Amino acid sequence: MRILLLALTIPAFAAPLPLGKIPPGHVLLVIQPHHDDHTTDYGMGGLIAKFTDAGYESWYVRASNDEKDGASGYPLNDMINLRESEAATRILGMKGVYSLNWRNDYMDPIPLIELRAQLILLIRKHRPDVVLGHDPWGHYDRNPDHRKVARAVAEAVWMAGLENVHPEHFALGLKPYRVPYLFLKARVDYGRGHHANVAMELTKSQVERKQKAYVTHLNVYAHPSMARAIRRQLRAENLTVPELEGKTDEEAAVLIEEWYMDWISRKRGAENGVRYAEVYWYRDEFDYLPGLKDYISTNAVK
Ligand SMILES: [Zn+2]
């Protein structure tokens, strides 16, 4: 009985995920609620750098104005966060940022159809081969902006391909376009986590660019007070970390955040049999037709 109880209470070691590949194509659209969602611990910065290395041209859509992210007050937070987002996306090799400027954390009242229409327009303009976003089918995300934008993205990538949807766009010379490939992420620090189906292997250089992009968001990350608190704790336990010696609290905080990005990338890598990785819920255009997908991969010729 005791052995049985142990078997029931110890979770089985998760099997490694299959390693994914960069899909064929050349345009990437990253659509996120916030200025920093492309460089979080739970994904995207490393993968965006990987797309850049594969020759993709990529664009970032920031749906909210991020006025509540930071300690500088609403108007300044908006401006600082946009500036830091532009700097971080440049580090990752992206071409530019669209800021839709919906009100941060108060996005629930905006009509879904209006946000979706904005995304359909951008999808028809850029005709991305790949879209990166939050997973609207994730178990739970307490952030209202994440839920709202994730749903709008899921609808827009499909509806942009329908010729009866927003036909006024065609007067501008745009054409219907359906996005073939999706990489979706979800938070893992609350809810029941993320059910990823693919691991994307990263190189050291891609992780380094992800680290740099992450700590570019100084308005929300790498606060000197965090380094001060860690040093206080170390001193109380008579411990020291040599790499932090001689550094200001500002420099130490940046270094600690870079270690964190390195750690999470190594952890996802170790779980999936490689040195560094990020994990995603990946869909391609034929995933909903598995029989057709098998037939094409077996029988298609050049
Ligand atoms: Zn966010």
Image: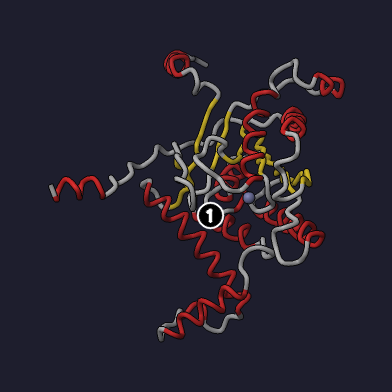
> In the image, what residue type sits under mark 1?
Asp
Say which of 199 and 186 sits in front: 186
Q: Residue at x 67, y 65 (%)?
A: 218
Tell me if 141 is positioned left or right of 175 in this view: left
Q: Residue at x 53, y 36 (%)?
A: 22
* Residue 210 screen position, x and y as percent: 58, 55
Tell me if 3 is positioned left or right of 193 in this view: left
Tell me if 1 is positioned left or right of 280 in this view: left
Q: Residue furthest left?
A: 1
Provide the residue designation for mark 1.
41
Vertical placement of residue 166 versus 8, above or below: above
Q: How is the image coloured?
A: secondary structure
* Residue 11 screen position, x and y as percent: 29, 47
Q: Residue at x 45, y 60 (%)?
A: 263
* Residue 220 screen position, x and y as percent: 66, 63
Crowding at dot 1, Cα within 10 Å, few <14 / some 14-19 / many 20+, comes out as many
Identify the image quadrant of residue 248: bottom right
Q: Secondary structure at mark 1?
A: loop
Vertical placement of residue 118 versus 101, above or below: above
Say which of 168 and 21 sits in front: 168
